[in-house]
Amino acid sequence: MVLEVRKKERETSQNLVHRFTKAVRQSGILIEKRRRQFHQRTKSDLVKKRSALNREKTKKEYEIEKKFSKPEQ
């Protein structure tokens, strides 16, 4: 994606830079770049399933621990 901003007549360089940064923000170039910066492999179905089961187990343990713990005073 090419982004071009030309200097207008009687425009200061500071205003030009401001317009350029605004155009970059609106185009979404930086967001896309940051998203692609670190490539993550997709997890297999088995890994996703094990992770979900582990989360549920940890959640249940936390609930039980919370239920039987003494209230703080």
Image (spheres, grey):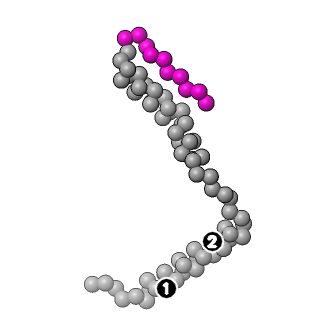
> What residue range appears in magenta?
1-10
6 horizontally vs 56: left or right = left
**Mark 1 or mark 2, which is nearer the start of the sequence?**
2
Q: Is residue 9 magenta?
A: yes
Secondary structure of residue under mark 1: helix
Residue type marked 1? Ile
Q: Name the residue under label 1.
A: 64
Q: Nearer the viewer, mark 2 or mark 1?
A: 2
Instruction: Give the main secondary structure, helix, strand or loop, of the magenta stretch.
Output: loop
Q: Name the residue under label 2.
A: 51
Residue 55 in the image: above or below residue 61: above
* Figure quadrant of residue 55: bottom right
* Quadrant location of the C terminus in the rendered image: bottom left
* Quadrant location of the N terminus in the rendered image: top right
Residue located 58% across and 51% down the image: 38
> Residue 42 at what x, y percent from top left?
68, 58
Residue located 54% across and 78% down the image: 58
Residue located 67% across and 57% down the image: 41
Q: Does the magenta stretch include residue 5?
A: yes
Furthest residue toward right: 45
Furthest residue toward left: 73
> Residue 62 at what x, y percent from top left?
49, 81
Q: Decide: few, some or many residues near mark 2? Use Cα within 10 Å; few <14, some 14-19, many ≥20.
A: few
